[in-house]
Amino acid sequence: MLLRFLTLCFVLVSTTSAAMPNTLTIIPELSNGFVRNYNPFRSDTLATTHDFVYEPLMVFDNGTPHFRLAERYALSPDLTGITLYLREGITWSDGAPFSSDDVVYSLSLLNKQPELDYNSLGKWVERVEKRGKNEVYVSLSRPNAQIAERLADAVIVPKHIWENIRGKRSYLNQHPVGTGPFTTIKAFTSNNIVQCRNPHYWQQEALNIDCIRYPTVRTNDELISRLSSGEFDWASAFIPDIERNYASYSRDYHYYHQPSTIVSLLFNFKHANPDTQAVFNDVRFRRAVSMCLARELLIDIAVFGQGQKAMFASGVESKFEDWIAPSAAEQHLYYIRNHAKVAQRLLDEMGLADTNGDGYRELPSGKPLALSIIAPTGWSDFTSAANVVSEMMGTAGLKVSVKELPYPKYIEDMATANYDISITNYPSGDTPFRYLNEAFNSDYHAPSSPRFAHHFFKDDVIDGLLSDFLLQTSPSAQRDVVNKLHLRIAEQQITVPLYYKLETVEYTSTRYRGWHTEKGKPAVPTIWPTERMRLIQLLDLYPTEARVSE
């Protein structure tokens, strides 16, 4: 009888342990509901696709590579090629071996099917050669000293699966086969996703988390409420007065933030209305908009003081202050400061005048000039900033409304040039290049590209300087190119930089430890899908003692 009782207890404990795996709850994006889309070649893929289903070749952190599918690389002396040495012993989640065939196939797809090349990597790939089971040579269309950083964002898919798929761009890939740590879709509804261990993951011993859970959160306010209740282990949310409204709730609630990328206004230079397009094309208008804004007040009201005033008229991040010469920084600083009278004079010079006495300026033709700023629904900081900007533009006689759009519609309208003005932030990089490239390179004007260059302003000089940067191997030469880019962008005031967003990360030590700040590293990375270091952070996590004993 005792033996039967002990056996039953063992079964119950085993069943309970199996039913309660170590699950990390994350919020990498706000969403109005999930579509089962694990296609890594689509910009609307789920936020848990990259890194967690499809592992990258490598991850860079401040210029230092963390090797994943690749274990090392070597640039050719003339910078026209790169050899990738792949890690042995990796298998896909269906048990098939990973090899150089998969890398050759995946990189070759970018030229064969350009619609899959969402990050414009294909323009660099001239041909891809297999040089052994675990060696691949990529011949470049032109020299690029930073090609390894670009290849870190490459999508590597299993050839034996994808070569048989027709219509790859429209394919939803609902049952993904990957090399990443979480390829088993344990649960999927429009409101909740649970992805569990890849049974063939090559770093099983380093993985102390069994599943990741990603629930639907529609707005930033909802996220703050649920985050404060302790539901989420890892998130990146704007929380007003974060010490009082989050950290004070528990000693296990932690946050980290620092000034990050710029939040800017984008003008639609491909506007369907020729009159509006002509207004946007006039640099006097863009400067007038910039100079009618009181940025300190904007930061205080819109983001409760949790921001930093723009330092550079090009929008370069403040952390790269030493990249921009003081003379270059000061040259256009005047245009990103509040000079209300100068702003009104510029608008007068353009012939934008209040001809009907309603308090708002009309076009020179007498037609009304009514504009709107689009912002994603639920992004409370963006919406608040857009509302404050619209009011400040109103003091200069510009009639501007704010239009909140569901995030997919916001992205679609920017991609199709179906908007007036937009508000956006940008991804960060190890150098100013990533921001400058993704924000101003005309290669990113394609509808499938990320939103950051969907102002559609094309400048051959900027494109040429961006290409020139990739030829430079010395820090001084790189800084010289960045200064030229800064001056060219600032001179034309292509965008209107508003403020540096505080990159905020919230995490709890209630259930997991191993956060990078605990290990003496400077920061916990964001959980956003554009942050490759999130994979490295996840692999460093382990359950707390309390969790282990459950």
Image (cartoon, grey):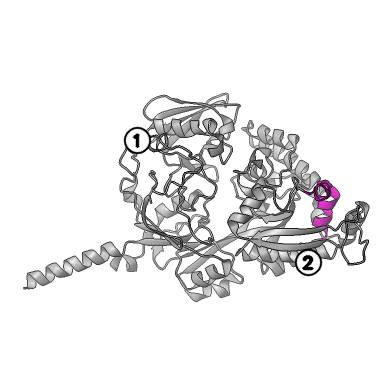
Q: What element carries label 2?
A: helix
Up-down relation of residue 62 to residue 292 (above or below): above
Left of 242 or right of it: where is 230? Answer: left
Q: What residue type is labelled 2?
A: Glu
Left of 31 or right of it: where is 305? Answer: right
Q: Which of 155 and 163 is in front in this view?
A: 163
Left of 392 or right of it: where is 203? Answer: left
Residue 130 lies within the magenta run: no
Q: Quadrant of residue 84?
A: top left
The residue range painted magenta reads: 273-292
Q: Position of residue 232 (x, y in %)?
A: 46, 66
Residue 544: mark in rendering:
none
Report the residue at 72% width, 66% height from top. Answer: 387
Measure how far apart labels 1 and 2 are at the Cα level.
59 Å
Identify residue for label 1.
Answer: 88
Identify residue for label 2.
Answer: 391
| Quadrant in which the N terminus appears | bottom left
